[in-house]
Image (tube, rainbow, N blue to C red):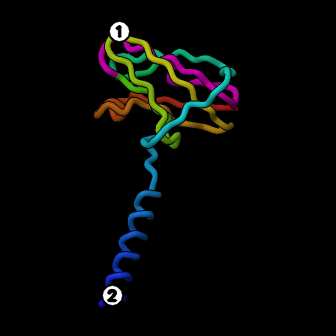
């Protein structure tokens, strides 16, 4: 009976670790911003289910983003960058920093319905 309980407890613990290790590509999770100066500062305007610009090219390293929302609450997230998010309400501006390696990334607004309405873009880091 004790062996069965231990086996069950071990299986439950293993499942919990496996589930906790499954990250979301949405970027949720704890995030620690990088320290140091950015190699580039990029301003992104959010309004009416679109970002301007919706295509960004930047050098690898620490990037600073400024999100300006002109109409309603919007967010700026980068897929596969766990936990990074900037949020700005109507008429507000918010900033955040992230360190990125070379590659192509998708940025998007995670407010329900916004990304599916076209509020996303491509970030090319060289």
Q: Is residue 124 left or right of residue 82?
A: right
The residue tagged 2 is: 2
Vertically, is 84 above or below 20?
A: above
Place of residue 20 in the rendered image (x, y in percent of width and height, measured from the top left): 42, 57
The residue tagged 1 is: 91
Residue found 51% across the figure and 17% down from its top: 66
For the N terminus, give its image quadrant. Answer: bottom left
Q: Is residue 68 magenta?
A: yes
Q: Which residues are the magenta region?
A: 53-73
Dominant secondary structure (helix, strand or loop) of the stretch shown in magenta? strand
View extreme (front): residue: 2
Q: Is residue 106 left or right of residue 59?
A: left
Secondary structure beneath label 2: helix
Q: In this rendered view, identify the residue nearer to me: 63 or 112.
A: 63
Residue found 46% across the figure and 41% down from its top: 30
Task: Using a 10 Å C-alpha cutoff, classify the residue at mark 1 as few (fewer than 14 neighbours), some (14 to 19) or many (20 or more).
Answer: few
Observer able to see residue 64: yes
Vertically, is 10 above or below 120?
A: below
View extreme (bottom): residue: 1
């Amino acid at each position: 009976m004790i062996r069965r309980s231990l086996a069950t407890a071990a299986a439950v613990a293993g499942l919990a670790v496996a589930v906790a290790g499954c990250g979301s590509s949405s970027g949720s999770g704890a995030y620690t911003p990088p320290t140091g100066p950015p190699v580039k500062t990029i301003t992104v305007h959010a309004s009416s289910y679109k970002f301007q610009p919706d295509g960004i090219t930047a050098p690898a390293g620490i990037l600073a983003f400024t999100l300006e929302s002109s109409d309603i609450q919007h967010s700026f997230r980068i897929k596969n960058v766990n936990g990074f998010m900037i949020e700005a309400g109507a008429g507000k501006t918010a900033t955040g920093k992230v360190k990125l390696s070379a590659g192509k990334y998708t940025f998007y607004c995670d407010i329900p319905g916004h990304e599916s309405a076209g509020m996303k873009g491509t970030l090319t880091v060289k």
